[in-house]
Amino acid sequence: MLENQLFDHWLNQKSQEILSKMDKEKVTTEDMLILTLKAQTNHFHHMDVEFRDEFKKIDQRFTHIESKFDKRFDRLYTVLMWGFGLILTSIFGLYIKMFLN
């Protein structure tokens, strides 16, 4: 982390120096490489922010879908348990009627 901060600080400082001398002096190939590197790091930073935002949206959608699924599953489970209970009660009632009468 510290290495990234040092590199970013150096790159920002160097690119500012180059941009300030652009009107006064001829820009060297090394200067252009530094400016290109700065542009790439800016691009990567913006893409990272955009991707993180998109992943958060996707995560929220999956959370929403999961909660809907869980609610439906809970309802289905309740219906099945009531049905199972009614079937067992009916079987037990028939058993009592047949063998105890």
Image (cartoon, helix red, strand yellow):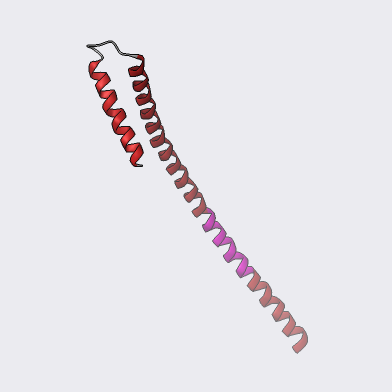
Above or below, 45 against 33 in this view is below
* Range shown magenta: 69-83
The N terminus appears in which quarter of the rendering? top left
Residue 21 visible in rendering: yes
The one nearer the camera, 82 or 62, is 62
The residue depicted at 25 percent of the width and 22 percent of the height is 17
Q: Main secondary structure of the magenta part?
A: helix
What is the tally of numbered marks visible in this picture?
A: 0
Taking the view exactly as shown, the residue that stands out farthest to the bottom is 100
Which residue is painted at 55% across and 61% down in the image?
Answer: 75
**Residue 24: x, y in percent?**
22, 11
80 in magenta: yes
**In the rendered image, which quarter is residue 98 located in?**
bottom right
- In the image, is residue 50 above or below residue 99? above
Q: Where is residue 51 in the image (x, y as percent from the top left)?
A: 43, 36
Answer with the quarter of the image where residue 20 lies. top left
Residue 66 pos. (x, y %): 51, 52
Left or right of 70? Residue 87 is right
Q: Where is residue 13 in the image (x, y as percent from the top left)?
A: 26, 28
Which residue is found at the position 37% from the left and 29% from the top?
Answer: 41
Which image quarter holds the C terminus?
bottom right
Residue 27 higher or lower than 41, as above or below? above
Residue 101 visible in the snapshot: no
Residue 76: name its quadrant. bottom right
Residue 82 magenta-drawn?
A: yes
